[in-house]
Image (cartoon, rainbow, N blue to C red):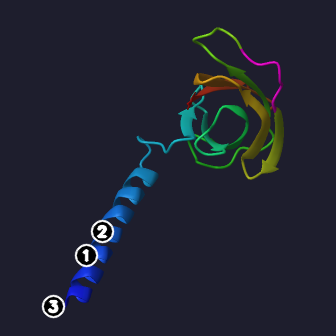
Amino acid sequence: MSADLGTTMSTHRTRSTLLSCWLAVGCSSSVPAPGVEAVDSASGALHVVARTVPNPPTRGTIEVDLEITDSATGSPRDGLTLAVTPWMPSMDHGTSLVPTVAPQGQGLYDVTNVDLFMSGTWDLNLAVSGPLLDNAVLQFSIP
């Protein structure tokens, strides 16, 4: 076997191993990627997946893309009214900016103006109203 062929095969094995690890972590519900949080609502009726922009989240004003589905069927949940409140539990305070929620359809909601101005753990408290009343708490760690 030539040195070039051996290097090529080693490179392919490494890429294959990295891809397998990435797929295992990316598709696992138990190990979310940084900047991605998945929770069920307090009642268990809704499943909420949040992705931050930027990802992973940084200190300052960020955006959060929410995907909300029915926990039982996996169907997208439209027509919900969401109030989002950032809260830093360790410091017992929120922020002065009020996030804006824009429904996008297909269970997608864009949340802008999310001000995570300090390093540490932040909760995003979601109050859900409309066809049902519920709530959920998403948590992000800001370096």
Residue sitting at x 26%, y 80%: 7
Whether the residues at callouts 2 and 1 have beta carbons within 8 Å, the answer is yes
Left/right placement of residue 52 relative to residue 38 reads: right
Q: Would you call the spot at circle 3 few (<14 residues within 10 Å), some (14-19), or many (20 or more)?
A: few
Nearer the observer: mark 3 or 2; the answer is 3
Q: Main secondary structure of the magenta part?
A: loop
Viewer-side residue, 66 vs 117: 117
Q: Which mark is residue 14?
A: 2
Residue sitting at x 82%, y 18%: 96
Which mark sits nearer the N-terminus, 3 or 2? 3
* Magenta span contains residue 86: no
Residue sitting at x 41%, y 57%: 22
Which mark sits nearer the N-terminus, 1 or 3? 3
Q: Would you call the spot at circle 1 few (<14 residues within 10 Å), some (14-19), or many (20 or more)?
A: few
Residue sitting at x 71%, y 44%: 77
Residue 59: give x, y in percent of width and height: 66, 31
In magenta, the rendered stretch is 94-99
Quadrant occupied by the C terminus: top right
Q: Which residue is mark 3?
A: 1
Quadrant in which residue 45 is drawn = top right
Local SS, label 3: loop
